[in-house]
Image (tube, rainbow, N blue to C red):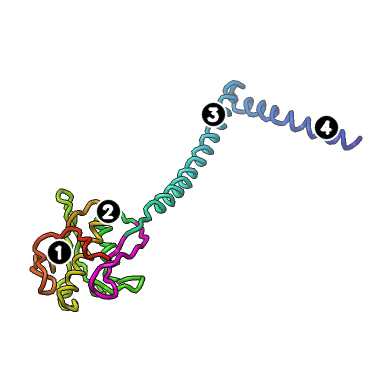
Amino acid sequence: MKKLFRYSGFALLGFFAPIFLILTTTYYFDIGIGNFISTTEKVITKLILTWNISSDSEDPSISASKKSMAIQKKLKKKVHLYFADNTDQFLKVEDRVVTYPDSPSQFAQLLLNALFEGSNKNLNPVLPKGDFLRAVYIENETQTAYIDLKQMIVSHFPGGITQELLSIYAIVNTLTLNMREVKQVKLTIGGQEAKTLNGHLDIRYPYTTNMLIVR
């Protein structure tokens, strides 16, 4: 019974305490009940808006993170790289999955660097391994990729007309068959137009896709 009276007392205190607080505040600050209620309502509304803004500011970040992950997954692309077969007479395809970069020029550079790095499936190299790529430029109007190689690449080619043929068409096929922005490829060396890569094939003109050399 004592507990019942005690709990009842707490309940009454909880009921009358806010009323007492409101009356005391309005009397002390000499404001009306209506103004007090209006001010209280504004404060509560502001708190609710602040909470909503805080919640909204978190949701977009989570959403943006999810979108970023989704975009990264979409940017994964299967590409076809061309290396020499075991006879060094033809090109052979090696498939890889790469992440598509921000621009076509960067994508072309990624593909060419993969050729310089060599095959992952024991195919023969078509380009000397090393940092021989100087610049890449894609002309949208003619869909021509201009590939500028460093001058020192000339002394690193093993030589032979067949090897030079494989090198050129490995570059050309890799770019033209993986990029819709590229229909032909023009090679330059050291920022200047060159006659050949290694004394055999004329590279003063652009090259287009050649599937007859692929096995």
SS category of the residue bearing label 3: helix
Q: Mark 1 highlights which residue? A: 187
- The amino acid sitting under disc 2 is Ser
Q: Mark 3 highlights which residue? A: 42
Q: Nearer the viewer, residue 21 or 215?
A: 215
- The amino acid sitting under disc 4 is Ser
Magenta region: 80-99
Extreme right residue here?
1
- Which of marks 4 and 3 precedes in the sequence? 4
- Which of marks 2 and 3 precedes in the sequence? 3
Q: Mark 2 highlights which residue? A: 103
- The amino acid sitting under disc 3 is Lys
Quarter of the figure with residue 7: top right
> Foreground mark, 1 or 4?
1
> Foreground mark, 4 or 2?
2
Circle 2 Cα neighbour tier, 10 Å, few/some/many (<14 / 14–19 / ≥20): few
SS category of the residue bearing label 1: strand
Residue at 69%, 30% (x, y): give it.
Answer: 18
Q: Nearer the viewer, residue 101 or 16?
A: 101
